[in-house]
Image (spheres, rainbow, N blue to C red):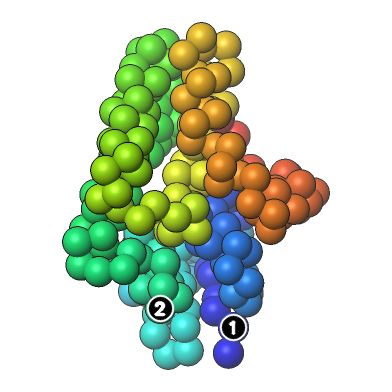
Amino acid sequence: MPYKLIYFPVRGRGQALRYLAVDNGLELQEEVVSDGAWSALKPKTPLGQLPVFQDGDLHLGQSNAILRYVARKHGLYGKNDREAALIDMINDQQEDIRQTYLHLIYQNYDAGKAAYIKNLPTQLAVLRKFLRKSRRRRILRWRQDQFCSLHHLSSAGQLEHPLPSHPGWASEAEAFHSRIASREKITKHRATDASKKLPINGNGKQ
Ligand code: 0HH
C-alpha cells in the first residue's frame, strides 16, 4: 500500500519527506489541503496540524517523527544506536536552523531580514564543521540518502532564498547542496514543473 502525505500546497514541512520518497523509490500519494478545507480537517488530525503521514492505519503528525519513522523502516537511520544518535543530533540542529527561518518568514520579515542574512552562514558553518569532522574521524558513516541529509536539502532550499547576495552564502550553499542535490532522482524531481512551481511557504515570502 502506498504511503500518503496530507499537507498544504507548499514545500514547507512536506519537502524533506517528498525527497526521501523520490530518492528511495517509495510510493507517496499526496492529499493537498486547501485553506478552505483545513478547518473541517484539523480536528480529525492526530495533533491538529499538518503534515500528516499515513502508512495504512498508522497516522502520524510531526514532520520529524514522520521522517524518522520512514528512515527507520527503510534503513536510512545509521547502522547502530550511536550513529542514530549522531543523525538525530544533526537533524535537530537542522530543525533549529529551520525555526530561525520560520520566525523570519512568518513573524519578522522586514525587521529581521538583515540580521538573518548576517547570522545564517555562521549557523551553517557550525553544522558543516561537525559534518566534516565526523566524516574525517569516521564517527558517522555519512550517507547522502540518510533522512537528515534530505532534510538538509529541503531546509537549505528554503534558506537560500533570502541570501543569494551574501558573500558567505555561496560556499555554504555549495557544501550543503551539491552532493545531495546532484543525486539523480532528486535532480530530476527538482527539475519538474510541479516541483519548481510549488511555493516554499504559505504567505508568499521567501
Ligand atoms: N512541529 C510541527 C511539525 O514539524 C509543526 C507543524 C506546523 O507548524 O510537523 N504545521 C502548520 C503547517 S506548516 C499547520 O498545520 C506551515 C505551512 C503553512 C502553509 C499554509 C498554506 C495554506 C494555503 C492553503 N498550520 C495550521 C494550523 O496550525 O492550524
Residue shown at 55% from the left, 46% from the top: 180
Most extreme residue toward the right is 193
Residue shown at 46% from the left, 14% from the top: 168
Q: Does residue 5 appear in this view?
A: yes
Q: Residues within 10 Å of mark 2 (few under 14, many from 20)?
A: few
Expressed as whole percent of the image width and height from the top left, the position of residue 133 reads: 29, 36
Quadrant occupied by the C terminus: top right
Residue 146 image-quadrant placement: bottom left
Q: Residues within 10 Å of mark 1 (few under 14, many from 20)?
A: few
Q: 42 or 104: nearer the eye?
A: 104
Residue shown at 57% from the left, 11% from the top: 165
> How far separated are the C-alphas under marks 2 and 1?
14 Å
In the rendered structure, which amino acid carries the disc numbered 2?
A: Lys
In the rendered structure, which amino acid carries the disc numbered 1?
A: Pro
Mark 2 / mark 1, whichever is N-terminal = 1
Residue shown at 55% from the left, 29% from the top: 174
| Circle 1 residue | 2
